[in-house]
Amino acid sequence: MENGLAWAAVGAAAGVVMCSIGFATFWMSIQRQITEAKTEASAAGLRGVQANLKIDTMQTSLSDFKVYAEKEFVNHDDLKELVGRHEAQFDNLREDLKGITTRLDRLLESRLPATHA
């Protein structure tokens, strides 16, 4: 009977050792997964910071280009104003030409003898 109790105690001790090894293996696996997850999270955070820096750089470049474009390129309102000024100048030129032709007609009429038929 003592032999049976000894084997039972050995079996129980082996069971405890096996459970301990199983738990240690499980815990080491979980710890490895936690470490990998933290590493991936850190890398993702770093990529996020890099992306934010790139966005800031692109926003600055876009703002600089907007300022450049406003200085260098004509906008719709500027074109309208320019067309309006040119139309007014052509109207003035047309009126001046009408005045000149009227004066030329009078001058020619005064110089040419009138022919009456």
Image (cartoon, rainbow, N blue to C red):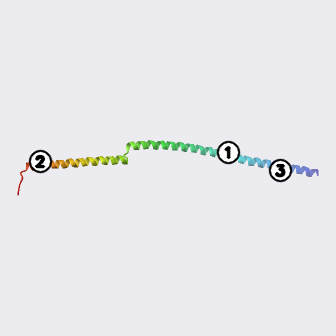
- Where is residue 114? Give x, y as percent: 6, 52
Cα separation between marks 1 and 2: 105 Å
Residue under pointer 2: 107
Secondary element type, mark 1: helix
For disc 3, the neighbor class at 10 Å (few under 14, some 14 to 19, many from 20) is few
Left or right, residue 103 beside residue 1: left
For disc 2, the neighbor class at 10 Å (few under 14, some 14 to 19, many from 20) is few
Q: Amino acid under label 1? A: Thr
Q: Amino acid under label 3? A: Gly
**Between residues 43 and 64, which one lies in front from this camera angle?**
64
**Between residues 96 and 8, which one lies in front from this camera angle?**
96
Left or right, residue 2 beside residue 20: right
Which numbered disc, 3 or 1, marks the residue closer to the eye? Answer: 1
Residue in view at x 82 percent, y 48 percent: 16
Cα separation between marks 3 and 2: 132 Å
**Between residues 86 and 58, which one lies in front from this camera angle?**
86
Mark 1 or 2 closer to N-term?
Answer: 1
Residue under pointer 3: 15
Q: Amino acid under label 2? A: Leu
Residue in view at x 71 percent, y 48 percent: 30
- Where is residue 105? Give x, y as percent: 13, 50
Which numbered disc, 3 or 2, marks the residue closer to the eye? Answer: 2
Residue in view at x 78 percent, y 48 percent: 21
Secondary element type, mark 3: helix
